[in-house]
Image: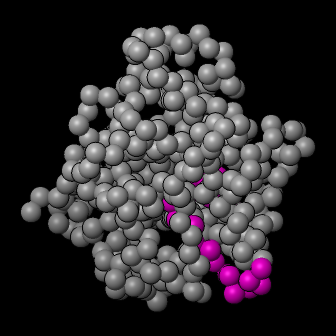
Amino acid sequence: MQTLEPRLPVTLLTGFLGAGKTTVLNHLLDDPQAGRIAVIVNEFGDVGLDHDLVEASTEEIILMDSGCLCCSIRGDLSRTMANLTARRQSGELTFDRVVIETTGIADPGPVLHSLVIDQAIAPRYRLDGVVTVADAATGPHILDTQFEAVNQIAMADLIVISKADLVTPEALERFRARLADINGTAKMLCADHGKVPAASLFGLSAMRADVTRTGLSDWLGAAAKPDPLAGLSGFAPKARPALEPSSLAHHANRISSAAIELEGPIPASVFDFWLDTLVALKGPDLLRMKGIVHVEGMDWPFVFHGVQHIFDAPVPLKSWAGDEKVSRVVVIARDMAEEDLRGSLETLRMRQESEGRAVAGMMSDSAAMPF
């Protein structure tokens, strides 16, 4: 039976130095439920892979006792994955998915870009999700001092909280609330001394034609609630004020997230103009954008996903059932006041008698993109 998505799923495993992502990875490799995985790790990782799991080693490829593979990045990611692809196609290697472990100080963005635009990667692999490991003990201080760690949280589909046993229940709840304030769309779970059920790490992205409504809802986070004044909703409990220079020392305060729900199909020109304008003005600071959109003239919705200025090809949901035509768009951005982020989303509510008038109105209204 032919699958809807022939590309192999890729999970990006990230987290700041010492968070415990290599411990999570070691447990994953030892889990028979994980299946056959090719694991790509940076050779300068925080902690080495558990040598007890290693069965044999040839060149850059390590065969694990569990049947998983591991290779270190000695060149660029493109060459490493091309090598894995060639050896899989020749029958030399067998694996069904890939896990990429980044270094502790890595920005996930460039790897996510490679999965979309690199011609050696994009035709054969797709992002299955970003998993970020966050240390409950040192995490609050790290979020204050290391903006890379904030980026890793903001880009996550799943946040695995490590070392929860080292803090009080009250401190753990405060940490969870802080993580949710940075990224309200990500799932969270606590690792049991590094152990996480393998199934919870996979199938996180909704960028696939067979995604269920539950899977899409999980990916987009909590449903937006109507605002009687502006009709907008987000994830933070209250809007942040415009950023002051002194506030930039607390890196997590630089992240804003917002969501909008729209009843009825959106004119394609309105959505395209809004997206193109937002990317042109704020591209580097758009940590993640995702959503489901019903477009005028189309029989089914599509899901979209982007990191900064790079977007995956939208996925049409041709099996979508029901008459509901509610679009939902989520944006997580950096150095952008939440009221401005919400203001930009409000432009999608513009409804004109003709698409030409809608776009003209957006272009002439100086408040349409309040940056």
Q: Residue furthest bottom?
A: 52
Q: Decide: is 282 above or below 94.
A: above
Q: How many circles with numbers are drawn on the protein? A: 0
Seen in the image, is 272 located left or right of residue 286?
Answer: left
Identify the residue at image location x=62%, y=74%.
161
- Residue at the far front in the pictured view: 228
Kindly indicate the quadrant of the structure image that contains residue 84: bottom left
Confirm whether residue 251 shows in the render: yes
Image spot of residue 126 (x, y percent): 34, 52
Q: Residue at x 31, y 57 (%)?
A: 211
Residue at the far right: name it: 246
Q: Nearer the viewer, residue 69 or 348?
A: 348
- The structure residue drawn at horizontal position 77% and vertical position 45%, both measured from the top left corner, is 240
- Left or right: residue 188 versus residue 201 is right
Hey, which residue is sitting farthest left in the picture? Answer: 1
Query: Looking at the picture, does residue 237 appear above or below residue 298?
Result: below
Q: Is residue 154 magenta?
A: yes
Q: Nearer the viewer, residue 348 or 157?
A: 348
Position of the C terminus by quadrant: top right
Q: How is the image coloured?
A: one colour
Q: Is residue 116 above or below residue 206?
A: above
In the image, 225 versus 239, the foreground residue is 225
Q: The magenta stretch spans which residues? A: 148-170
Residue occupying the point 59% across, 39% down: 231
Answer whether residue 102 is visible to the viewer in this image: no
2 displayed left or right of 124: left
Residue 34 is covered by the magenta coloring? no
* Residue 147, x across and y down, in percent: 73, 52
Q: Position of residue 190 (x, y in %)?
A: 59, 79
Q: Where is 42 relative to 251, above or below? A: below
Q: Quadrant of the N terminus?
A: bottom left
